[in-house]
Amino acid sequence: MKSVLSERKTLHPQDIERRELPPDAGRAVRELAREICTTIHRSSRGAAPVTRTLDDAALIASIEAGARELPESVRLAMRPPAGSAGATIVSRLPLTDEEFGPTPPSWREAARWSADPQRGNSFQLDIAMLLLARCAGEPFGWSGQQDGRLVNNIVPTPGHEDEQSGASSKTLLSPHTEDAFHPDRANLLVLACLRNPDLVGTTVSSVRQVELTEDEYRLLSTPTLPILPDVSYGKGHERFTPPPIPTVWDAAETGSGATCQTLRYDPAYTPLDDADPEFRSAYARLTAELERVSHTAALAPGELLLVDNDVAVHGRVPFTARYDGTDRWLKRVNIRLPERRRRAEEAHENGYGQRTVAPFRMGNGRADAERDTTPDERGTVEHS
Ligand SMILES: [Fe+2]
């Protein structure tokens, strides 16, 4: 897919909001993560499931308690993006390249190696990510993604170079809403950079910066087509009736009563051929506009990209993976913002049978109940 996105390499675009973790706040997050890591290792004797899925009850309790102890400046840095770009870069999470070992060849090895001192130890950073994410909202995972792990690893994977997935490299990862097919998709997405020596760009485009005619907006806000689960969810979604959904709409803003533009967009998994030419034309205009307003951020180690998943789509420019342990490595966390409401109609969507792992969901105590142990391969090819 030809795109102008691949030709842009703005290191730190001015129009993406930037924030810094104050030095004491960054240190507090890392030190607390180190303490929790030590305690968990001692109590579990390094048992693999703790590091594999991160939803161990003792670990969750430590994160809950720890997040409350962190300085207020952490919560301020992790609040949702404020500008119209729908994205914020938070910098200065202290880390060094030596502490994680080589970039793993897939999410499975990343999880397996995370507690292995011989191959790097990113478990501590997983805990830091959960602490940061808990300061923003409710971190959650997907039962069918990376074994339900609450912190995902995004690394290029041999054999997946040309897919529309986070494991890809050579192909442009088209802009998309994360898990657009599902009513429980994240409100906020955090992509944290451990390593990015080739300055591979992550793209973000906001619906609040696009220009559409009234007719185009009306067409796109009419529920017309479904968004299907991506290939990484495997087979089985065919038994569910795909609900037609709007692509853009005005959502009520929490507290103010004002409305703000919102989108749900993943062209790679939208059956556009089923729509009439008028709708397809409006959708093509939206795609062109999202490219026009796209910003590319080449994240540096210790930087976190916060993406408002209701406002901005994200993607990644193509790159050539080396598979020598030095490739780009991101950690990703999905976050639910409990104060944010979705369209009432979404409550009736089936989500194609995919379920969340939500141990921080307030008041539901569903951490274990929501675990689905059915193995599938979604995590091998999920989006970045
Ligand atoms: Fe993604």
Image (cartoon, grey):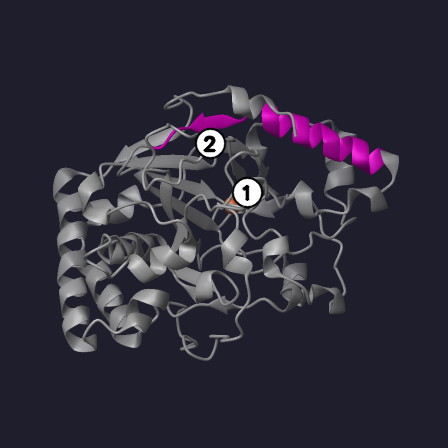
Query: 377 and 20: which one is in front?
Result: 377
Asked if residue 286 lies in the magenta stretch, the reply is yes
* N-terminal-most mark, 2 or 1: 1
| Percent x, y of residue 67 | 23, 59
| Percent x, y of residue 297 | 41, 29
Amino acid residing under circle 1: Ala
Residue range (magenta): 278-299
Q: Residue 258 carries which label?
A: 1
Asked if residue 338 lies in the magenta stretch, the reply is no
* Residue furthest right in the image: 276
Query: What main secondary structure does the magenta stretch of the protein show?
Result: helix
Mark 2–mark 1 Cα distance, whole angstroms, equals 44 Å
Element at badge 2? loop
Residue 27 visible in the displayed image: yes
Q: Quadrant of residue 137?
A: bottom left
Query: 11 and 217: which one is in front?
Result: 11
Crowd around label 1: few <14 · some 14–19 · many ≥20 (10 Å) = few
Identify whether 90 is placed above or below 29: above
Amino acid residing under circle 2: Thr
Give the residue at mark 2.
Answer: 320
